[in-house]
Image (cartoon, rainbow, N blue to C red):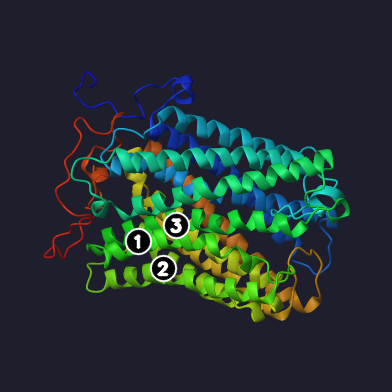
């Protein structure tokens, strides 16, 4: 308590810089992640803008071939490893999971801080590659190009990605132990918010899959630096082995990115339709199903790598199966809206946008899971468009929707709703204008990773670059009004949305230890009264 009798919150408990860098408060660590992840998002976005500028014209008149190779490689590495994978778990998961389950912190607070330092060290090392020549292998580091022929700073980038993986493993381990051992009395498994279920499934993937990538990168480093014949066929190695190791992690990593955003969506649809999620138990179990099935589909990235037709058929069927639990979520969210008291605040706009983008991305994923189709559109812009609809469209819609939903809880301040709605509209329109033309380009045969192309592709590329400009404005606006709200925004009540959940029963922003007394949970998740036909905004 301070002299006025008001409880001290985690933001003003101490203003010294060292108190932030040595904190073990999960909420402060989430803020540290928010700042650093945002920095890397804008670095990756800068590379994307340069790529779209180059592709405005058919001739490669802005960058040379090797410079363009470095651009799209660094864009992919920064966005995937340092933004998309950690964004929702490290920021929203770190901040909310202990509060949602009625705990005062994560199980291992010091390890939580360590994971942030590991992330910063790894990400910084990888981005230093820009200053020492860049890296041009693509974000997949395919061999033998990455180990024999590339003249870029491959080893430094590999070390950075390798180190960052330990941050992911430690975060996943922390979440798993916290959810298992620190739930408040009465918080049974089927009273957990679906946001927590999604992070539980994600944490399983982090802990089980990330060591495989670490092993692959370590072997890649050994071959690159010491010329040990692991993947290089000239030295008796097998380059396809690297693809197996890489995609065994990197396809489940798709779900590390998208599952937490799906958890955000469940919270948003429940809060802004004033209803319990339809088929709550099925949606909860579908998160686990996605995590488990995700380990069995890596081979659909390798239809043209020389694996047998029979292996390809098996991976194709399994890839169709993993679409089922994702469809369960989409259908159950839609059913939740039926006869709900729907309110169209900014977070709900992002939720609707997520449904649209994820549906397009998911359906086109079925095209790529079909071996006969994939062979023809492999390494074209069709794959680029599909990937961005799932990863960037899905993850960022969830991330931004979650930030807007919990921003009043995180900061105790409200943002300008009109500007936020405009931003959501620009993101949705700009995203579709950027990436939908790329489906057409890929279908027409334009290969990815080329900075020169035939003139007949220019109109669609100009549309894509125009959309990227709109999208960039949509992404930049939240940075402006979120920062503005910290000083000028109205003070937020504890529960500005009239939502259910333990996080909405404590003050905004929360106190350092979240709860004065550990709460006792006596009702199911999303226990909105059936007669409550009015949204409390």
The numbered dot on residue 325 is 2
Where residue 487 sits, quadrant-wise, is: top left
Query: Is residue 241 or residue 368 the one in the foreground?
Result: 241
Q: Secondary structure at mark 3?
A: helix
Query: Measured from the top left, where is residue 201 in percent x and y?
Result: 42, 53
Left or right: 308, with 186 as reference point: right
As measured in the structure, the alpha-carbon distance from the residue carrying label 1 to the one carrying label 2 is 8 Å
Q: Earlier in the sequence, mark 2 or mark 3?
A: 3
Q: x, y (%) of residue 406? A: 35, 47
| Residue 528 makes an appearance in the image | yes
Front-most of 50 and 83? 83
Query: Dot 1 lies on which element?
Result: helix
Q: Which mark is residue 351?
A: none
Disc number for residue 259: 3
Q: From the viewer's perspective, is the residue at label 2 or at label 3 nearer?
A: 2
1 and 2 marks in contact (CB < 8 Å): yes
Give neighbour class at mark 3: few <14, some 14-19, many 20+ (Cα, 10 Å).
many
* Point 53% across, 59% down: residue: 295
Q: Residues within 10 Å of mark 2 (few under 14, many from 20)?
A: many
Q: In terms of sequence position, does the residue under pointer 3 or pointer 1 come before the other?
A: 3
- Measured from the top left, where is residue 101 in percent x and y? 28, 43
Q: Is residue 153 visible?
A: no
Kindly identify the residue that appears in the image at 56 percent across and 38 percent down.
166
**Residue 196's x, y, as percent?**
34, 50
Disc 1 or 2, which lies upstream in sequence? 1
Q: Which residue is mark 1?
A: 285
């Amino acid at each position: 308590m301070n002299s006025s009798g008001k409880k001290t919150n985690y933001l003003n408990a101490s203003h010294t810089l060292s108190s932030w860098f040595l904190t073990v408060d999960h909420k402060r660590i989430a803020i540290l992640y928010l700042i650093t992840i945002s920095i890397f998002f804008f670095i990756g976005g800068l590379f994307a803008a340069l790529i779209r500028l180059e592709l405005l014209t058919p001739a490669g008149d802005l960058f040379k071939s090797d410079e363009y190779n470095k651009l799209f490689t660094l864009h992919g590495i920064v966005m995937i490893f340092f933004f998309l994978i950690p964004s929702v778990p490290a920021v929203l998961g770190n901040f909310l999971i202990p509060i949602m389950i009625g705990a005062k912190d994560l199980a291992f607070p010091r390890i939580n801080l360590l994971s942030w330092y590991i992330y910063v060290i790894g990400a910084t090392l990888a981005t230093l590659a820009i200053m020492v020549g860049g890296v041009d292998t693509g974000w997949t580091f395919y061999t033998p190009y990455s180990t024999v022929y590339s003249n870029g700073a491959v080893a430094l980038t590999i070390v950075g990605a390798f180190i960052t993986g330990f941050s992911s493993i430690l975060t996943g381990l922390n979440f798993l132990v916290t959810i298992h051992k620190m739930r408040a009395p009465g918080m049974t498994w089927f009273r957990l918010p679906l946001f927590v279920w999604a992070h539980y499934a994600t944490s399983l993937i982090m802990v089980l899959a990330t060591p495989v990538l670490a092993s692959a990168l370590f072997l890649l480093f050994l071959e690159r630096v010491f010329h040990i014949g692991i993947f290089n066929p000239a030295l008796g190695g097998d380059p396809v082995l690297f693809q197996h190791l890489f995609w065994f992690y990197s396809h489940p990593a798709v779900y590390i990115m998208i599952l937490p955003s799906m958890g955000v969506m469940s919270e948003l649809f429940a809060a802004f339709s004033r209803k319990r999620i339809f088929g709550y138990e099925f949606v909860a179990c579908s998160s686990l199903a996605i995590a488990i099935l995700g380990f069995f589909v890596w081979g659909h990235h390798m239809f043209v790598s020389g694996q047998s037709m029979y292996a390809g058929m098996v991976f194709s069927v399994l890839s169709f199966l993993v679409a089922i639990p994702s469809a369960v979520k989409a259908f159950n969210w839609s059913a939740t809206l039926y006869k709900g008291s729907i309110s169209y605040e900014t977070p709900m706009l992002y939720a609707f946008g997520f449904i649209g983008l994820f549906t397009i991305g998911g359906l086109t994923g079925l095209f790529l899971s079909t071996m006969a189709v994939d062979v023809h559109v492999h390494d074209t812009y069709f794959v680029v468009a599909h990937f961005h609809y799932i990863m960037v469209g899905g993850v960022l819609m969830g991330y931004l929707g979650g930030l807007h939903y919990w921003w009043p809880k995180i900061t105790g301040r409200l943002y300008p709703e009109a500007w936020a709605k405009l931003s959501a509209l620009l993101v949705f329109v700009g995203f579709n204008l950027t990436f939908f033309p790329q489906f057409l380009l890929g279908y027409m045969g334009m290969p990815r990773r080329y900075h020169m192309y035939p003139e007949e592709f220019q109109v669609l590329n100009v549309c894509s670059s125009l959309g990227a400009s709109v999208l960039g404005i949509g992404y930049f606006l939240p940075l402006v009004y979120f920062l503005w709200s910290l000083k000028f925004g109205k003070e937020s009540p504890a529960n500005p949305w009239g939502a259910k959940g333990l996080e909405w029963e404590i003050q905004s922003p929360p106190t350092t230890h979240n709860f004065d007394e550990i709460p006792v949970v006596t009702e199911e998740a999303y226990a909105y009264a059936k007669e409550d036909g009015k949204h409390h905004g």
